[in-house]
Amino acid sequence: MVTTKQQPQGTYWKYSWAKKIDSYLLRFPLLRTILRGGFIKLQSTNNSRSIKGQNNRINIHDSILKNTRIDIQGNDNTIEIKAQTIIDNLTFHIRGSGHHISIGSNCRFNEGGTIWVEDEGCRLVVGENTFILKAHISLTESNSSIEIGKNCMLSSDIDIRSGDSHSIIDLSTGDRINYASSIKIEDHVWIGAHAKILKGVSIAKNSVVGMGSIVTKNVLSNTIVAGIPAQTVKTNITWQSERV
């Protein structure tokens, strides 16, 4: 069974005339709901879905999806996209069961990218007001998670992986030595183009990851890191998206 809900919850109007109309229609709730739903549907184009399994749920709250593919094989998976979010040219590739993906309100996914989830019980959370230009976000081992906080800015061609996808074996013991480990990116983090965030990393708030960096260790708050592997290059900083 596939459950899909289009639930108006908040308002996103790109054009000033639409805002004025929406304000006027507050006096006519039923008509407002019908017109808003039609406007969002008109903006949501060229999407595709392939869903195989039971009890998969896709909940989209008053948001716009364009050129987006949802490909699910498994059971009891949930994708929730909250209000005022715009997603363009993103692929959701889900294999296995019990996964949960939550994308907060007023987020932007632009210029492509992939959310790739495998095995069982993985969790991806993206906080509100986060902008992701293009990223490959990968959870490839059971019960691992990736959390991206509020007000983050991720540039193009970024790779975030909670696992290695394949096994590395210690020949002396026969044991696997490269299990997955969860990733946490806190609020207001800026990640430059072509950066890679590897398993087990925590990046604290107000930090910056330089272009092309490979982050293998935790990053402290208010810190710039850069390089391969990434090292601290400056502390006691913050950042803002506007040029001042």
Image (tube, helix red, strand yellow):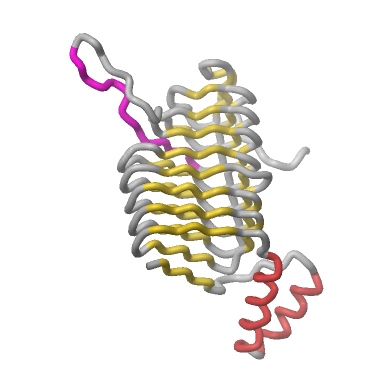
x 63%, y 31%: residue: 192
x 57%, y 53%: residue: 69
> Would you say residue 131 sits in the magenta stretch?
no
x 58%, y 27%: residue: 195
Compared with 84, 206 (above or below) is above
For the N terminus, the quadrant is: bottom left
Residue that extends furthest to the left in the rendered view of this protein: 173
Residue that extends furthest to the top in the rendered view of this protein: 172
Q: Nearer the viewer, residue 125 or 173?
A: 173
x 34%, y 57%: residue: 75
> Would you say residue 179 sits in the magenta stretch?
yes
Is residue 108 rendered to the left or right of residue 196?
Answer: right
The x, y position of residue 209, in whole percent, is 58, 28
Is residue 214 rendered to the left or right of residue 183?
Answer: right
Q: Nearer the viewer, residue 124 or 91?
A: 91
State the extent of the magenta-drawn residues as a range: 173-186
Q: Nearer the viewer, residue 177 or 71?
A: 71
The x, y position of residue 70, in whole percent, is 52, 55
Based on the displayed image, in which of its 4 quarters is residue 51 positioned? bottom left
- The secondary structure that dominates the magenta segment is loop
Compared with 6, 207 (above or below) is above
Based on the displayed image, in which of its 4 quarters is residue 47 positioned? bottom right
The x, y position of residue 76, in whole percent, is 34, 59
Compared with 6, 224 (above or below) is above
For the C terminus, the quadrant is: top right
